[in-house]
Amino acid sequence: LTKDQINEANTRIGFLTAEKNKREIKLAIAAKDILELWTQLNIRAQTEREEQIESGSLDSFQLSNENMAWLDQVKQSLTAHLEENQTLRKNLIAKLQSLWTRMELPFDEQKLFLEEHPGFTDPLIVKLKEEVHRLEELKLKNLEKFIRLTRVEIENYWDMMFYSEEDKKLFTPFYSENIGETRRSFLQTIPESG
């Protein structure tokens, strides 16, 4: 071997060693992040690569380009899933709080429900959706009460916007005493507060 060939080999070895070290660091960070995301989403490993990450057996994890790309893809997918569940939870909790307020449910019951349903897992999102559905059904059963509370809310908005009595009278569903489909459609036009 010539001196140039030896220098070139040493440079190549140095580059490969640095790349290996860089990939090992990336693997360690990605594995930690993925484990944290799995914990938040209550997900378990299902493939051999995932089991290596879950068990912490990173020494046997191949540092190939394919596996490094897979790590990025898994992390991005889990991050998107968590963000979606966080948004869903936020929106569902807001909807629940609006329904709780309108139904005048005791604060202790609300607090207990929220304490019993923490996190961002898929089963939790299902439970929140079920509770929203249950309360929506209860809302329909208590239509009279909702109409009364909605009227108070509308009157407050009218007062804040300085509506005249003539303007108020133009909104005829507000004064209707018919219970039935007119009321249901009226209620559906009122945005949920919260």
Image (tube, helix red, strand yellow):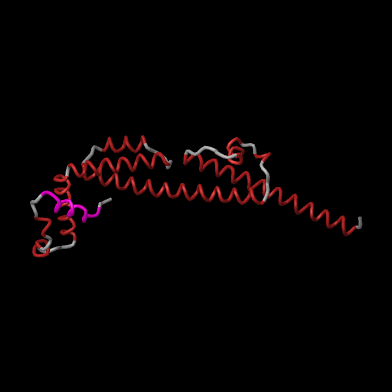
The x, y position of residue 151, in whole percent, is: 15, 52
The x, y position of residue 10, in whole percent, is: 82, 53
Residue shown at the point (21%, 45%) measured from the top left: 102
The x, y position of residue 100, in whole percent, is: 25, 42
Residue shown at the point (24%, 54%) measured from the top left: 191
* Observer-nearest of 7 and 175: 175
Determine if the magenta segment contains residue 52.
no
* Left or right relative to 118: residue 95: left
* Observer-nearest of 40 and 107: 40
* Left or right relative to 14: residue 76: left
Q: Which residues are magenta?
A: 179-191
Quadrant of the image occupied by residue 108: top left
The quarter of the picture where the N terminus appears is bottom right
Classified by dominant secondary structure, the portion drawn in magenta counts as helix
Residue shown at the point (25%, 52%) measured from the top left: 192
The x, y position of residue 160, in whole percent, is: 18, 59
